[in-house]
Image: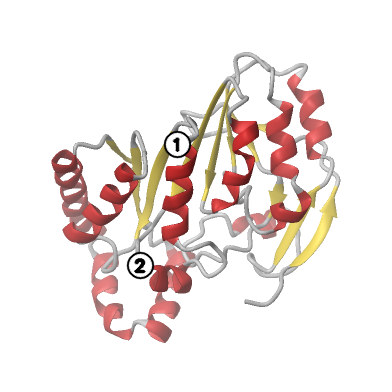
C-alpha cells in the first residue's frame, strides 16, 4: 500500500456522545484509518469532514486530543468510553504520535469511567501498563477470519489475525479483560460452521470472556468495493456472494443459527448484532 498522507488537526472536542446503546462516549484520536478494510462503514467520514482523498489514504492526527480530553473530563459525567468507533486508535500512526496512549493516561485516577478499546492492532499491547492502571478497562480485538493471506487482501493495512489473537492472550495474561469482535463475518469465506468454530474457538483460547458477532452489510458502497475485490482476487466467489445479496434475510437466518450452535458447542457467550 502507498504511504498514507498525514496531517495535524486541532480538535475542539474529542469525547463525543455515542449513538451506540452500550456506549456513552466515543473517542477517536485520529481522523481516517489506513487499515484499508474493504468492508469499512466509516468511509463517509472523508466527505463529512471535507477531507480530500480516498478513505484509507490519509490520517489526521488530533495532536491536542489529550489536552482537550483532560479538560472535558472535568465537566463530563462518568460513563462508558470506547476508543476507536470510526478509526482504529492503534493504527500505524499511533506508533509515532502516541495520541491514544496519552488519552488513556488522562483516565488514570478518574473514577466512574469504563474505558474500552476496539482495535485490529496488536500495538495496543504496548500500552498494557496504562490499561492496568485504569479503574475499569477492557480491550476488544476484531477478527474477521483466521486466514492471514485472506486478511492481507481484505484488511491490507492491519496486522494479521494471528498476531491479534496473540495480543489478546497477552493482555488477558496481564489481567486486562478482553473480548472478541467477530465481524463482519465474510460471506463464503468465514461463514461456514468450521470457520466460525475456528474464530470463536481461537478467541476463547486467547482469553475472550465474550464475543460480539456481526454479518457483512452489503449496502451499495460496500458491495461495490467487495464485488470489485472478488472480481480481482476470488472470481469463483462472485456468484455466491451475489446470491446472498439477493436474499439477505434467508442468509442471515441461517448464519445466525450456525453462530448460535457453534457458540453453544464451544461454551462461549456470543451476542449477535444482526
Location of residue 223 in the rendering, given as x and y in whole percent from the top left corner: 42, 68
Residue holding disc 2:
147
Q: Is residue 162 above or below residue 67?
A: below
How far, Cα to Cα, is label 2 from label 1?
24 Å
Residue holding disc 1:
173
Q: Quadrant of residue 102?
A: top right
Residue that appears at 60% across and 14% down: 112
The mark nearer the N terminus, 2 or 1, is 2
Q: Is residue 141 left or right of residue 263?
A: right
Residue that appears at 28% across and 71% down: 241
**Local secondary structure at mark 2:** loop
Q: Is residue 120 above or below residue 78?
A: below
Taking depth in this image into account, of 138 and 79 the one nearest to the observer is 138
Taking depth in this image into account, of 47 and 152 the one nearest to the observer is 152
Q: Is residue 7 above or below residue 14?
A: below
Locate the C terminus by quadrant.
top left
Depth-wise, is mark 2 or mark 1 nearer the camera? 1
Residue that appears at 33% across and 63% down: 186
Residue that appears at 35% across and 48% down: 214
Locate the N terminus by quadrant.
bottom right
**Can residue 274 be seen from the camera position used here?**
no
User: What is the total number of numbered labels drawn onto the structure image?
Assistant: 2
Location of residue 209 in the rendering, given as x and y in whole percent from the top left corner: 34, 33
Location of residue 100 in the rendering, given as x and y in whole percent from the top left corner: 69, 42
Amino acid at each position: 500500500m502507498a504511504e498514507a498522507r498525514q496531517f495535524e488537526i486541532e480538535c475542539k472536542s474529542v469525547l463525543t456522545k455515542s449513538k451506540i446503546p452500550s456506549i456513552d462516549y466515543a473517542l477517536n484520536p485520529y481522523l481516517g484509518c489506513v487499515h484499508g478494510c474493504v468492508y469499512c462503514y466509516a468511509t463517509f467520514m472523508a466527505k463529512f469532514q471535507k477531507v480530500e482523498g480516498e478513505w484509507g489514504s490519509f490520517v489526521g492526527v488530533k495532536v491536542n486530543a489529550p489536552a482537550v480530553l483532560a479538560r472535558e473530563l472535568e465537566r463530563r459525567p462518568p460513563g462508558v468510553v470506547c476508543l476507536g468507533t470510526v478509526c482504529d486508535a492503534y493504527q500505524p500512526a499511533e506508533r509515532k504520535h502516541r495520541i491514544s496512549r496519552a488519552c488513556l493516561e488522562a483516565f488514570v485516577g478518574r473514577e466512574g469511567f469504563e474505558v474500552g478499546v476496539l482495535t485490529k492492532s496488536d500495538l495496543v499491547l504496548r500500552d498494557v501498563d496504562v490499561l492496568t492502571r485504569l479503574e475499569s478497562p477492557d480491550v476488544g480485538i476484531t477478527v474477521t477470519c483466521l486466514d492471514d493471506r485472506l486478511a492481507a487482501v481484505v484488511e491490507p493495512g492491519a496486522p494479521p489475525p494471528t498476531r491479534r489473537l496473540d495480543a489478546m492472550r497477552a493482555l488477558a495474561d496481564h489481567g486486562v479483560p478482553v473480548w472478541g469482535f467477530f465481524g463482519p463475518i465474510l460471506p463464503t469465506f468465514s461463514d461456514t460452521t468450521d470457520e466460525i468454530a475456528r474464530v470463536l474457538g481461537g478467541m476463547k483460547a486467547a482469553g475472550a470472556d465474550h464475543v460480539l458477532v456481526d454479518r457483512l452489510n452489503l449496502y451499495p458502497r460496500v458491495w461495490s468495493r467487495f464485488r470489485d475485490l472478488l472480481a480481482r482476487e476470488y472470481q469463483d466467489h462472485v456468484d455466491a456472494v451475489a446470491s446472498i445479496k439477493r436474499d439477505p434475510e434467508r442468509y442471515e437466518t441461517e448464519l445466525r443459527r450456525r453462530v448460535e450452535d457453534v457458540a453453544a458447542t464451544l461454551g462461549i457467550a456470543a451476542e449477535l448484532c444482526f
